[in-house]
């Protein structure tokens, strides 16, 4: 009986991993910076736009506070500029590249586009 309980505890501990997301920061950086493939570059842009859209929707619905603010008007920002800011953030935070890319993209937005 003790062996059964011990086996159950070990199985529970081995499956109790933290959520790391589907894409890591290192995978996103490779897609955005190192790939020659236009298809993979498109995945990079799509991933960043997806994070921006979902967080923006949460803000509009009142589920999140404004942690970052996009420039508007003549000083507006393009997806290409946002991609460069995200890549720069990932390069400066290489020790965090094992973490979920979505969280790192969000932190890049907060750093690059603070609300004034």
Image (spheres, rainbow, N blue to C red):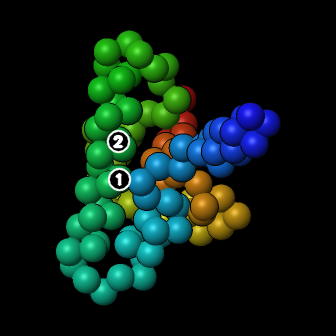
Q: Residue furthest top?
A: 62
Picture residue at 43% right of the left edge, 58% below the top: 23
Q: Secondary structure at mark 2?
A: helix
Picture residue at 49% right of the left edge, 19% below the top: 65
Taking depth in this image into account, of 21 and 52 the one nearest to the observer is 21
Residue pointed to by mark 2: 52
- Left/right placement of residue 92 relative to residue 77 reads right
Number of disc labels: 2
Image quadrant holding the N terminus, namely top right
Residue 2 location, quadrant? top right
Image coordinates of residue 84 in percent, x first then y, are 43, 64
Image coordinates of residue 4 in percent, x first then y, are 69, 39
Residue 107 appears in the rendering: no
Picture residue at 38% right of the left edge, 13% below the top: 62
Above-or-below relation of 24 to 29: above
Residue 3 appears in the rendering: yes
Q: What mark, if any, has residue 16 been given in the picture?
A: none
- Left/right placement of residue 25 relative to residue 82 reads right
Residue pointed to by mark 1: 48
Do labels 2 and 1 touch, CB within 8 Å? yes
Image coordinates of residue 46 in percent, x first then y, are 26, 56
Judge the density around disc 1: few (<14), some (14-19), many (≥20) Cα neighbours within 10 Å: many
Q: Residue furthest bottom?
A: 36
Q: Secondary structure at mark 1?
A: helix
Above-or-below relation of 36 to 20: below
Taking depth in this image into account, of 106 and 109 the one nearest to the observer is 106
Q: Residue furthest front?
A: 1
- Left/right placement of residue 16 relative to residue 60 reads right
Taking depth in this image into account, of 96 and 6 the one nearest to the observer is 6
Image quadrant holding the C terminus, namely top right
Judge the density around disc 2: few (<14), some (14-19), many (≥20) Cα neighbours within 10 Å: some
- Left/right placement of residue 19 relative to residue 69 reads right
């Amino acid at each position: 009986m003790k062996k059964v309980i011990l086996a159950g505890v070990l199985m529970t501990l081995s499956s109790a991993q933290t959520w790391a997301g589907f894409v890591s920061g290192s995978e996103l950086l490779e897609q955005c910076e190192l790939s020659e493939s236009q298809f993979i570059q498109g995945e990079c842009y799509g991933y960043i736009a997806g994070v921006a859209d979902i967080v923006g929707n949460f803000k509009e619905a009142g589920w999140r506070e404004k942690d970052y603010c996009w420039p508007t008007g003549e000083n507006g920002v393009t997806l290409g500029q946002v991609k460069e800011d995200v890549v720069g953030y990932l390069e400066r935070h290489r020790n965090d590249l094992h973490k979920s890319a979505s969280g790192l993209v969000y932190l890049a937005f907060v750093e690059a586009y603070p609300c004034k």
